[in-house]
Amino acid sequence: MFRYLAALSLVFVLPIPCLSQQLGLNFNSSPQLIRDVLKDAQVSGSVVFSGGCKFQDRSGPLPHVGMRRDFGSVRETLQHMLAVNSKIRVMQDSDGTVRIAEADVPTDILSVKIHHISFSASTSLSSDGSLGALHMHGPFVALMTILATPEVTAFQEAHHIDFDDTSRVPGNLFSPANSPEVSGELNDVTLSQALDYVLKTFPGYWVYEDATCEDGSRAVRFRFY
């Protein structure tokens, strides 16, 4: 399984000026724009959307995001910023967690129930995908732990779901050595609840991107920002 998990993408993106700013939109800086709104509101969240077939239908790493204009609540502000996509809805849980979701996106894998997850104090992964000398820190380590659970791997194999490789997404999988690490244990949680748990150590938001084709083939991509 590590050959699949090592291919998952964890991307931290800084705003990049582009021509879309002239239209009031900044596609390349979408991740940071969303993160800034959540940070100012002192909440975390999640983004669920479709990447199109084989992740080839979108030029940016997230749904198109317009420039920020504050409308009082974090939900209203983000809904306005994402208004270019009529299928996007922004909701907020009772605990303040913000949920940005595109309609009609398959989310069955997010509901997979995991019996037990133990986040170890440290994890090492060699360049060939086996446990070894290359020490990693940050939310990517926790993501690998979650996706390596028996329940998630069984669901992936049963439904023929591929994890997208890093060749299509720029970025760095490895956080600085002095970054915090997720610790503790979880019992009987869904995959999405496990991702939420990671945000307690790394405030921000997680992204689930689904790429389903007409022929039935399917791939998914997970990221943290």
Image (cartoon, helix red, strand yellow):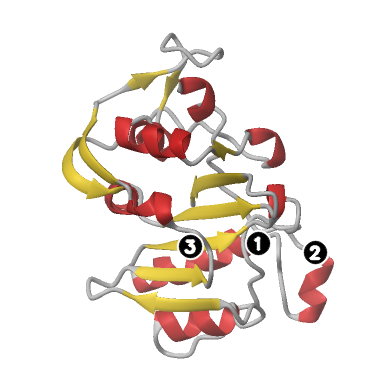
Label 2, label 1: how many angstroms apart (C-alpha)?
Answer: 9 Å
- Where disc 2 sits, the SS reads loop
Q: Of callouts 2 and 3, which one flags the residue occurring earlier in the amino acid sequence?
A: 2
- Where disc 1 sits, the SS reads loop
Judging depth in this view, the residue of 20 and 189 nearest the camera is: 189
Whether residue 180 is visible: no
The outermost residue toward the bottom is 71
Q: Of callouts 3 and 1, which one flags the residue occurring earlier in the amino acid sequence?
A: 1
Question: What is the quadrant of residue 116 in the picture?
Answer: top left
Residue at 67% over, 42% down: 169
Task: Give percent across and percent down for residue 134.
Answer: 47, 15
Judging depth in this view, the residue of 135 and 168 nearest the camera is: 168
CB under 8 Å between callouts 2 and 1? Answer: yes
- Taking the image as shown, residue 122 lies to the left or right of residue 188, namely right
Q: How many marks?
A: 3
Residue at 53% over, 69% down: 104
Task: Give percent across and percent down for residue 44.
Answer: 36, 63
Question: What is the quadrant of residue 167 in the picture?
Answer: top right
Q: Which mark is residue 50?
A: none
CB under 8 Å between callouts 2 and 3? Answer: no
Q: Identify which amino acid the numbered label 2 is placed on.
A: Cys
Residue at 46% over, 86% down: 76
The residue wearing badge 1 is 29
Q: Which mark is residue 18?
A: 2
The residue wearing badge 3 is 47
CB under 8 Å between callouts 3 and 1? Answer: no
| Mark 3 or 1: the one toward you | 3
Q: Identify which amino acid the numbered label 1 is placed on.
A: Ser
